[in-house]
Image (cartoon, grey):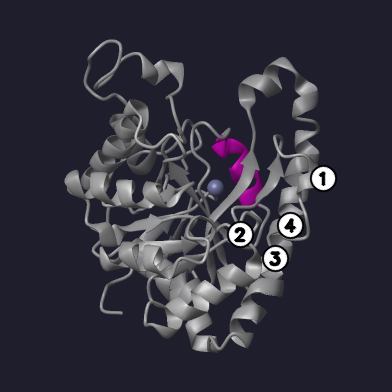
């Protein structure tokens, strides 16, 4: 691989060498909640001890398929609560890496919205120092450090607040060297993210443009356009049935046959517990073992080799964390 290993912090509070990440799912969630709603109306949260126990059970089932690491990309805006994740991490036999960033598709949380570049009161960007603190010192009082930066763009495109997030994440990346992973809702989001991040001095090979399995809808040209600029692409929403599975698998097999198998990472975008998606919308695809049970075998049937599959789950996640990283962890 030509790069040297780095120690990556985990939600247990220790570190794992990038050489030991093993099979890794790059875009997962443990808990997706809305704290403000949960505090006001506790029935929206239910039994958190039960949710923790269920998460432990689901992640141990995932570990039994051979997966060794998940990246929990839950950011502010999706109920990030690292103390809860740490409780789970201590009881499961896999590494949970956590993220920093703010999940915003239109407007920032009020705390950041009114003050900042282009905002009601023009002020320097305040978010960047918080992201850097999460990476260098730890999140809240947990002592757990973030190992990846998360940023989102959606149907509304580059609103002022989305732009602030992209620029702030770029600045935190420049200061720390940790990789960036993104949420996209439509193809334009991936193009916009690459353009803004590049403008802000980010080496696009340190970026995973997420959810292309859903946004590309089989469009090879779109994904190759992103790959040409050097980024990784995430086929990382297999638990979101926005595009049918055959289309996703077919596109992956084509990309791998065309030599892009070293630039693709995989995941489900599944949460062990989510309080805003009713169970009746969670079909068979909504589970942590869906890739191992269903998608992986389909890829093999579509002509992807065992070593091709290993690249997606082992070699590529490792490279995302260690390529040109400055050892900031
Ligand atoms: Zn997600």
Locate residue 146 relative to residue 117 in the image: left or right.
Answer: right
- What secondary structure is found at the residue carrying circle 2? loop
Q: Counting other residues with Cα less than 10 Å from the Cα at mark 4, is it few (<14), some (14-19), or many (20 or more)?
A: many
Of labels 2 and 4, the one closer to you? 2
Q: Read off the magenta span.
A: 80-90
Residue at the spot 61% in from the left edge and 51% down from the top edge: 89
Note whether 231 is above or below 202 in the view shown: below
Please tell me whether residue 88 belongs to the stretch shown in magenta. yes
Q: Which mark is residue 58?
A: 4
Q: CA distance from mark 3 to mark 2?
A: 19 Å
Q: Position of residue 98 (x, y in %)?
A: 49, 48
Q: CA distance from mark 4 to mark 3?
A: 8 Å
Secondary structure mostly taken by the magenta-highlighted segment of the chain: helix
Locate residue 252 relative to residue 171 in the image: left or right.
Answer: right
| Mark sitting earlier along the chain (2/4) | 4
Q: CA distance from mark 2 to mark 4?
A: 25 Å
- What secondary structure is found at the residue carrying circle 1? helix
Locate residue 134 relative to residue 296 in the image: left or right.
Answer: left
Seen from the viewer's position, the closer of residues 81 and 267 is: 267
The residue tagged 1 is 280
Of labels 3 and 1, the one closer to you? 1
Residue at the spot 42% in from the left edge and 75% down from the top edge: 315
- What secondary structure is found at the residue carrying circle 3? loop
The residue tagged 3 is 289
Which image quarter is the N terminus in? bottom left
Q: Position of residue 231 (x, y in %)?
A: 32, 62
Note whether 90 is above or below 120 in the view shown: below
Tell me if label 3 and label 1 are in contact, CB under 8 Å.
Answer: no
Seen from the viewer's position, the closer of residues 12 and 282 is: 282
């Amino acid at each position: 691989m030509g790069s040297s290993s780095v120690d990556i912090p985990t939600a247990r509070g220790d570190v794992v060498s990038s050489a030991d990440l093993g099979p890794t799912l790059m875009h997962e969630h443990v808990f997706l909640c809305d704290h403000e709603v949960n505090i006001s109306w506790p029935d929206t949260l239910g039994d958190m001890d039960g949710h923790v126990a269920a998460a432990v059970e689901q992640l141990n089932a995932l570990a039994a398929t051979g997966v060794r690491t998940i990246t929990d990309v839950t950011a502010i805006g999706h109920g990030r609560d690292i103390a809860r994740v740490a409780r789970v991490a201590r009881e499961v036999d896999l590494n949970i890496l956590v993220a920093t960033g703010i999940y915003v598709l239109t407007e920032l949380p009020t705390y950041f919205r009114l003050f900042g570049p282009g905002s009601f009161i023009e002020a320097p960007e305040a978010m960047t120092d918080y992201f850097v603190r999460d990476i260098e010192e730890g999140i809240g009082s947990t002592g757990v450090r973030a190992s990846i930066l998360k940023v989102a763009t959606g149907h509304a495109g580059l609103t002022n607040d989305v732009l602030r997030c992209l620029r702030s994440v770029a600045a935190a990346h420049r200061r720390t060297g940790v990789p960036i992973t993104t949420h996209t809702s439509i193809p334009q989001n991936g193009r916009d993210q690459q353009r803004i991040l590049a403008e802000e001095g980010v080496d696009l090979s340190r970026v995973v443009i997420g959810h292309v399995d859903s946004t590309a809808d089989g469009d090879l040209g779109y994904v190759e356009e992103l790959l040409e600029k050097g980024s990784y692409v995430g086929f990382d929403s297999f638990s979101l049935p926005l595009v049918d599975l055959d289309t996703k698998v077919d596109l992956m097999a084509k990309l791998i046959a065309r030599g892009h198998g070293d630039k693709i990472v995989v995941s489900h975008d599944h949460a062990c517990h989510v309080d805003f998606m009713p169970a009746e919308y969670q079909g068979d695809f909504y589970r942590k073992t869906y890739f191992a049970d269903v998608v992986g075998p389909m890829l093999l049937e579509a002509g992807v080799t065992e070593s091709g599959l290993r690249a997606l789950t082992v070699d590529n996640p490792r490279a995302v964390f260690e390529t040109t990283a400055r050892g900031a962890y």
